[in-house]
Amino acid sequence: MLEPVKPIAEEFSLPRRLLCPRSLSGVLARAWLLCLLLSLLEWLTPLAFNNRGMSSGLHCGIWLLSPFVAQRLPKLKWLPQVLWGSLLLSLTLGLLLCLWLFGLGIISLSHQYHFFFGTNDSHATWKTEYIYARRNGAVVARQGCQYWSLQGINARHSRTVRIRPLTPLMNWITPAEEDHPTGWTVVDKKAVYFSPDSTRQYQADAQQAGQQRCWQEQQRLDSTAGPAPRLELPAATQRGAGTLGFELAGKVWRNFGHCFDGKVCADYCPARVSGVLENGDPANPIYSFRIMTELRAGPARRQRLSLWLTHVKGPGVYEANSPSDARKDYNLELYDEITDSLYSQASALGNPEQWTGPTAQPSQLPDVARVTITRLDADAQILSGTFEGQLRTTDPRAKPLPVRKGRFDVQYHLFR
């Protein structure tokens, strides 16, 4: 006996149930389809939402609304089980890895958290920080974010992209090979000046004006005779305080100069200390670092200092006892702008016979240059330690100057 032929409308009744809802469950099932389509556009194309909260809301909708899809379409009754099962399984594995391998577990849980609950203020969100160039409504910009990864826990990352607005809610973002492409208008300003938030723009203007005022005051102090300020050594901290100091021939030398702290011009400027850590081979954890800072205290003390050390494997003691060792592994250089003189550790580790004379006391000088690294934290990017040695100009008859009680505590930038 022949079976009756089903009407064409009945053959396509399942998709029609989803696309033409007649109940609340049908509306929610249709909302699930919209969440899925928009999320696929974001995942598979350069489209990106302006609002990170909207993107996270769509991701949550795919999971939360899946039971209504299964209710509307019996053929998809497996969908909620697969989605929620995979989520609970990955969550369980992440918790177990936290107990076994802390880093891997935190990384997986962090990515899940930002996938479902990310906001525009979260560290894992790409934020536009600087605008290089502009053409019509599109810009070439630098974006930065800070997320958990195997390359560095909570490491800082940046990228240069082209951002082209398509709608008030979505942008078309692609990698940019050049910061200032031909035919584009040069901007070179912080992204805050392109924000609709006038309060942030006012704060940025006030910060820039305050810094400019402090630089002008610094120039006036550099040309005005007056008593030298009394300097004290900074505390030997290990929290990335941005300090460096030591005793040079019995006098305190430390990072000192005028800067704007957000309210007034301050003489203590930790921002003047910059640290750079280099690692040529990420698979081999051996680093080189360089710390630079300056002292500007009136017309008589305007000096720049550079401290660098190679073949660093981690916390420990590193020594140099010859000029070749100093030039190759460790050096301390001090440049005096007033006298146009350069003092270096390598020059001081020369022939001890050159230190003879009524004022030279080589027995009181350390035999070696020594740097002790007390903290090298790749997660927080903090480098701290102590150092000692001596400085001397290239003149063979110059008197060595002892460097004692040196300490530094800086946040560094990592270059590979």
Image (tube, rainbow, N blue to C red):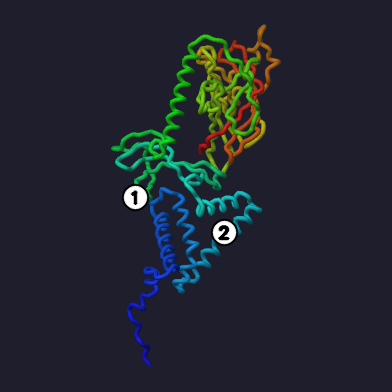
| Residue at mark 1 | 167
Give the mark toward the camera: 1 or 2.
Answer: 1
Q: Where is residue 177 in the image (x, y as percent from the top left)?
A: 37, 41
Image quadrant containing the N terminus: bottom left
For residue 28, the mark is none
Residue 64 horizontal side relative to residue 369, left or right: left
Task: Tell me which amino acid carries mark 1.
Answer: Thr
Choose top left, top right, bottom left or bottom right for residue 244.
Answer: top right
- Does residue 385 show up? yes
Q: Which residue is drawn at 58% across and 58% down?
A: 91
Quadrant of residue 332 in the image? Answer: top right
Q: Position of residue 63 (x, y in %)?
A: 50, 62
Which residue shows up at 43% across the image and 35% down it? Answer: 199
The mark nearer the N terminus, 1 or 2, is 2
Q: In this view, does 16 lie above or below 45?
A: below
Residue placed most toward the observer, 24 or 408: 24
Residue picked out by circle 2: 90
Residue 45, image x, y percentages: 38, 54
Residue at the front extreme of this rendering: 23
Residue 320, can we see it? no
* 204 relative to 300 in the view: left or right: left
Q: What element carries label 1?
A: loop
